[in-house]
Image (cartoon, helix red, strand yellow):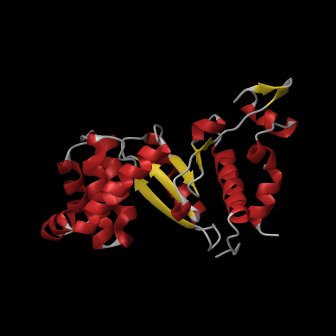
Amino acid sequence: MTRMVQVAAIVAGIIIGVSSPAIRAQGLNGLGGMTDGTHQFKPYRRIHLGPEYRDTIIEAMVYECPFCRALNNQTLRWADTLPSSIHFEQMPAAVGKPWISMAQSYFAVAAIDPGILPRFDSEAFHLVQDDHDSYSDPRTYALATEKIGVRPADYLAAMRYKPVQQLVLQDIRVMGKAGIRQTPSLIICGRYVITPGSVQGNYSLYFQLANALASHCISENHLEDETP
């Protein structure tokens, strides 16, 4: 039995939305509603992105979000533990015009070299949250790329690259269809959305819930369950 299947068994009540004494002890009692006198909670939202996302987990994040920053490294470490049948990616939460420049810059950096994205993330978080540069100003992200050693000419060329523009449009569609309004959010297999707020800020339970839902998707979609 893989670690994800074991976690799924432990928190199976979350999948079906029925609470248990063990879960209530962790502060989740009261989320959701009541049915037939029994407390129920569903610390996730159901969505339908389509079958193309059935093997994908997306983290929606923004650089002005302190929780995204606090969880960034932990989220990437967690992603490394996912089975090979699940693809993980981060996407800027382009939920409106102020976030378009962030998304365009993110995908431009990824087009140049996806290996430098963690450094770009770190610098962008620093500029927005520590130096209080505007998260909506394209110059903030141009400065972030300069600070991590990207040549301005390469960055500008990537910003104009047609596939980058297509990724931005895809990002906008995904965020809109998933109804993202809080960050960070995990969009799991195109079917579920969870946030740390879903479990009252319990980060450990947040990742346990993510594992359980991912395991559920593997079973539901008949994906091959293999650890990396």
**Rendered residue at 48%/62% (across/down):** 89
Between 190 and 25, the residue placed more toward the observer is: 190
Using the rendered image of the protein, determine whether residue 162 is visible from the camera's viewpoint.
yes
Using the rendered image of the protein, determine whether residue 131 is visible from the camera's viewpoint.
no
Considering the image in quadrants, where does the C terminus appear? bottom right
Q: Is residue 54 left or right of residue 6?
A: left
Q: Provide residue 170's location: percent of width, then percent of height.
A: 36, 57
Q: Provide residue 39's location: percent of width, then percent of height.
A: 81, 28
Considering the image in quadrants, where does the N terminus appear? bottom right
Between 98 and 45, the residue placed more toward the observer is: 45
Between 123 and 207, the residue placed more toward the observer is: 207
Q: Is residue 207 left or right of residue 162?
A: right
**Rendered residue at 55%/50% (across/down):** 48
**Rendered residue at 86%/25% (across/down):** 36
**Rendered residue at 69%/49% (across/down):** 209
73 up-or-down from 40: above or below = below
Furthest residue in direction left, as rendered: 153
Q: Provide residue 121's location: percent of width, then percent of height.
A: 37, 56
Q: Is residue 128 left or right of residue 9?
A: left
Q: Provide residue 41's location: percent of width, then percent of height.
A: 73, 34
Number of numbered discs on residues: 0
Q: Is residue 15 left or right of residue 135?
A: right
